[in-house]
Structure formats: structure tokens, C-alpha cells
Amino acid sequence: MGLKIKPEHKKYIRLVAGLILLVLGSVFMLIPFIPLGYIFLIASLFLLATYIPPLKDIINKIKSNDEKGRVSQVEKKISEGEKFVNDKLLDEKSDT
């Protein structure tokens, strides 16, 4: 029937995804010909901001300096990803 995740584990998915993106972003920052480092780092900031409140201030500062709207695009993609997780992966039934 596919992978179903219990709703109480959703907070761990967000944390693990944020940490993975943080590591990937840090690695890609060191490789100059792969421009995804900044995107992964910003995405990890959005995901980890619920666990580390000062990150929200950093996100707002980055948004104010972003002239091309890339931060808003990343934020939109993260929202779409969270909606996908809610719709497709979370087990709505409590099988206890």
C-alpha cells in the first residue's frame, strides 16, 4: 500500500530533512560549479526555523536582501513539499 508515516513522526521528518539539506548545502558551497548550495542552505533554514527560533530572523534578513525572489521560490517549494507529505505519506488512520 506504500509508505505511511504516523502523524506524530512528522516533526522528525522535518528535522531530518532540514539536517540533510544543511549538510548538502554546506558540501555544495565548497564545490563552485554546483550552484545549489545556497538553495539547500535556505531550504534547511526554513525547515529548521521551527526548532531554532533565531533562524527566523536570519530568514527575514535574507528575504530583505533577495532582489530576485529566490528565497520566496524556495519557501513556496518547501510548502508544496510539506503539503505532499501531509497528503500522501501521513497515515490518517490511527492503527493502535
Image (cartoon, grey):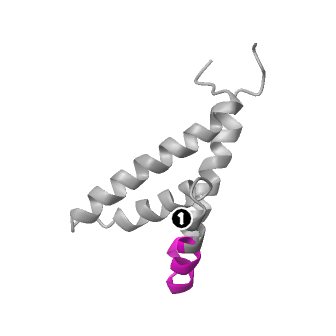
In the displayed structure, would residue 63 be above or below residue 84? below
What residue is rendered at 54% in x and 55% in y? 48
Identified at 59% across, 64% down, the residue is 75
Residues 49 and 64: in front is 49
Magenta span: 58-71
Image quadrant assignment for residue 41: bottom left
Residue placed furthest toward the right:
93
Q: Residue at x 27, y 56 (%)?
A: 27
- Magenta stretch encompasses residue 20: no
- Answer above or below: position of 61 versus 24: below
Quarter of the picture containing the N terminus is: top right
Please give left or right for residue 79 compared with residue 24 in the image.
Answer: right
Residue 94, located in which quarter of the rendered image? Answer: top right
Residue appearing at x 53%, y 73% in the figure: 58
Nearer the observer, 68 or 63: 63
Q: Position of residue 89 (x, y in %)?
A: 63, 32
Q: Residues within 10 Å of mark 1 (few under 14, many from 20)?
A: some
Side of 87 relative to 26 (left or right)? right
Return the x and y of residue 70 as percentages of the image width and height. Answer: 50, 74
The percent position of residue 45, horizontal first and vertical second, equals: 51, 61
Tell me the SS state at disc 1. Answer: helix
| Magenta stretch, main secondary structure class | helix
**Quadrant hosting residue 85:** top right
Q: Amino acid at mark 1?
A: Val
**Residue sitting nearer the eye, 18 or 91:** 18
Q: Which residue is mark 1?
A: 74
